[in-house]
Image: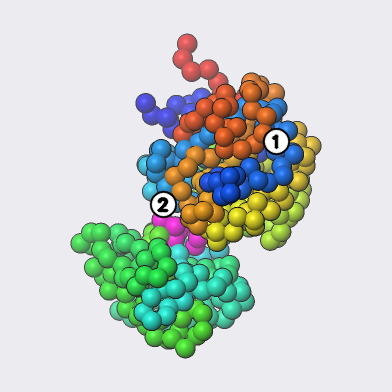
Amino acid sequence: MDFEKIVKELSIETNSKIILLVIDGLGGLPMKGKTELEAAHTPNLDSLAAESTCGLTDPVFMGITPGSGPAHLSLFGYDPTKYILGRGILEALGVGVSVGKNDLVARGNFATLKDDLIVDRRAGRIPTSDNEKLCQRLNSFLKTKDGTKITLYPGKEHRFVVKFSGKGLSDALTDADPQKENKHRVYTQPLSQEASKAVETVNTFLDEVTEFLKNSPKANTILLRGFSKFPSLPTMEELYKLRPAAIANYPMYKGLAKLVGMKIINVGQEMNDLFNALEKNYNNYNFFYVHVKKTDSAGEDGNFLAKKKAIEETDKFIPRLLALQPEVLVVTSDHSTPSLLKSHSWHPNPFILHSRTAQTDKTTLFSEKECSMGYLGRFQAVYTMPLMLAHAGKLKKYGA
């Protein structure tokens, strides 16, 4: 069954509003008997769950740990096994990098190398201002070689985007990132014969930058992953007849939203800025993707208390969402990031769907365990979009 084709044929344009609140990395695992969500004081989310229909979602399949790209694509109604996106293109578009047909982009981290081991993959989360200075220095140092120009673009903290501009550069490359700390540096490897030029270009670049940064105390090497070129996806307007907007303050998520045709609403760095922007722009669009990042960052740092605090901070804004009276409000996550694991995981995501057409169930709290007993059960996240469209009255009947 062609899921995408059916939903496209059934979608109708209406003025009803949908808000999708994604609390990044929300799901967790118990530490001292409770997950971060269970330990958090969330009276508003608990009340919302009790008045909604709940469940658990798997971003891809059971047991598969997703990256942020495929996990979000699922929520937006795109089959993540059909549309394979490199992290680099998402980050590049998010920071406003122009990507042409001859460009190869990757997401980068400044990292700390000691005794030939990567001891900190994030270079202590250096300040963004330091990142900007490093990128400026490296751009002055790098020269065009064999017709390939290399440019770095600073992101937040330790993150940056690198663009290789030249002909014959394939994105069929493995990540140049050991993915774990206390491992040796790794070089990119070709995944096809056409990638030989790109491999040589990237690996030479890695060595030159590491040599250039060798005297830096923290950011003395780089890691690259998500090599990619510009993909082609149908927009959410084409598929679902929506006027979508994205409210996020991290580049990668803005890049992903831009790829699927969302209007990017520029916001500040505080959580309050997200909800101010939603209220200010509420009359201009009928689908809103609101992204909260703090929960995921805390989970990746293994900081249980910080993640719990970020959940509690988010909870305070739920009344403001309800005051807008959207036809559909969904609160969920793209993937789980348990503090116990300090990484993304395969565990399912708690899910709330609030609408006047949604059947309430026996869920009384917003937690992993409570949502597992919800009316929706456990389902693939790609069905989030048709559920939202249906409850918003945006899908007509299928068949006679």
Mark 2, Cα crowd under 10 Å, few <14 / some 14-19 / many 20+, is many
- Extent of the magenta region: 86-94
Q: Amino acid at mark 1?
A: Asp
Query: Residue 242 versus residue 69: which sits nearer the camera?
Result: 69
> In this view of the protein, can residue 318 be seen by the observer?
yes
Residue most extreme to the top: 400
- CA distance separating discs 2 and 1: 35 Å
CB under 8 Å between callouts 2 and 1? Answer: no
Which marked residue is nearer to the observer: mark 2 or mark 1? 1
Q: Give the vertical position of 157 relative to 283 (above or below).
A: below
Q: Which residue is mark 1?
A: 46
The N terminus: image quadrant: top left
Query: Residue 48 versus residue 324: which sits nearer the camera?
Result: 48
Q: Position of residue 172 (x, y in %)?
A: 30, 59
Query: Residue 41 versus residue 185: which sits nearer the camera?
Result: 41
In the shown orientation, is residue 295 left or right of residue 199? right
Q: Which residue is mark 2?
A: 85
Mark 1, Cα crowd under 10 Å, few <14 / some 14-19 / many 20+, is some
- Residue appearing at x 50%, y 60% in the figure: 91
Q: Position of residue 35 (x, y in %)?
A: 58, 45
Residue most extreme to the bottom: 215
Magenta stretch, main secondary structure, is helix
- Residue appearing at x 49%, y 62% in the figure: 92
- Residue appearing at x 53%, y 46% in the figure: 29
